[in-house]
Amino acid sequence: MAGPIDIFRTEKIKGVKNLGSVYAWEEGRASLFLDEITTGGAKGGILCYYNPPVHQVGNPGLDAYHAALDAIIENKLDDWSFVIFYGGCDPVHAGGDLKESLNRLTETIEKRRELEKAGRPREEIEALYAWGDKRIEKGVGLYKKVRRVSDHLRTLAICGGGTRFGGSAEIALMTDVLVGDSRSGMCFSEAQIGLIPGWAGVGRAYTKAGMLNARFMASTSREVKAADLKACGIYNAVVEVALPFPKKERTDDPRADKRRYAEALQAHNDEVGAMLAPAALDLATCPAHEIPVVTGKDRKILATDREMEEEVARRVNPMNYEGLWGRPLKEVREEIKRLGKPLAPQSIAELRGLFETYPEGRFDEARFVEDEKQADSRLYRDPRFKLGILATLEQKVADFREVQE
């Protein structure tokens, strides 16, 4: 079986013995495997999700995650001492499938217009967005299962490769201990689209890195790289990886280019995985007090409150982008470098409401996550959400002025 799970099914990781598969799911090129392993006298699991080339977490993948967590909850809580979330060490790890969301949203808006014209009840119109609500609920349901497992086992995530966006970052954040590739990063890009992280990402960032850093990540949609993720408390350890990412050749034989690139990625996954796995296994089996943790005043502050507010105020005003709306980002590179990408006003309003409701002294993660979920659900219904998806897919400057559907 090709893919990152391979290093745990061979003898590439010293001291690891694979006891076999507990759960397996495959659909096309995507897969999720839960294997049982032993290391250093301890027994645990490797949960490996793989969906190349950018590892989007679609609904089938979410379902597979749920099934794997159910298998742990039902059979392994008394037998294992840890579970490690793992995946590809590729350049990008995306969140949801925006094309799929665009198609569903377009159908929903058209149907909504028909129902509104026919004078149908508000409840019937609201029900059209059930597809979005179910996806958000499924993500938060996964968070709840990971946290339940964390009450019994040590949960860890290996963040190999490059940047994790949206759901790919949030699933890693659901665990207790994160091991990062030095080339990696996290980006809550949702406020550039018209949403907020709805799978407990903001709440978990708040728990790990404090309110100010969680606000910065969610409100600015800026990428935070590995060194800062460790300094602010999100990563517990960072492994230095000096390797370049494989690049796809472009010759007159596209099939051969694709094959060679896949082979290069597999070799890269093997090499980087063999570097990251020992660090994760050490943290999975060491005494709890030996796990590096950065808390309180020791955390790095990614931006001051004033710096953050000034940046958000500039980027959240659609009129600051007058003359740029709809233009390709590559054509207005200098203007965007100066201004930053536009932020959706509706997203920033929901985030402000969340943080005002839960200042540091009154933060409760479970309640925050429920409110985070409801806020994200409301944003699916805002007509500016479609504009944000289109701008992202087309790589153009978003126009977040008020619109009427």
Image (tube, rainbow, N blue to C red):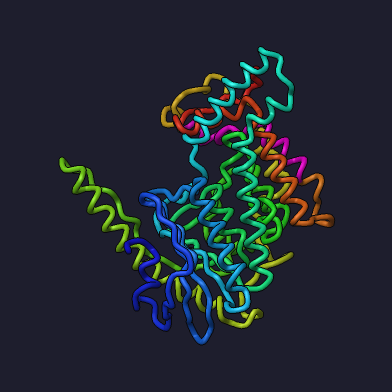
Split into 4 quadrants, where in the image is the C terminus?
Answer: top right
Residue 73 percent across, percent down from the top left: 62, 67
**Quadrant of res 15:** bottom left
Q: Which residues are magenta?
A: 334-354
Residue furthest to the bottom in view is 41
Residue 323 percent across, percent down from the top left: 53, 19
Residue 228 percent across, percent down from the top left: 57, 59
Q: Front-most of 3 and 245?
A: 3
- Where is 286 relative to 126, above or below? below
Residue 135 percent across, percent down from the top left: 59, 43
* Left or right: where 368 falls relative to 163: right
* Left or right: where 44 falls relative to 54: right
Residue furthest to the left in view is 252
**Quadrant of res 402:** top right
Residue drawn at the location 55% of the way across and 70% of the way down: 83
Magenta span includes 197: no
Q: Front-most of 383 and 187?
A: 383
Residue drawn at the location 59% of the way across and 62% of the way down: 70
**Quadrant of res 252:** top left
Q: Is residue 290 visible?
A: yes
The number of numbered discs placed on residues in the rendered structure image is: 0
Q: Is residue 183 visible?
A: no
Split into 4 quadrants, where in the image is the N terminus?
Answer: bottom left
Most common secondary structure along the magenta stretch: helix
* Left or right: where 348 falls relative to 246: right
Q: Front-most of 219 and 227?
A: 219
Residue drawn at the location 49% of the way across and 33% of the way down: 392
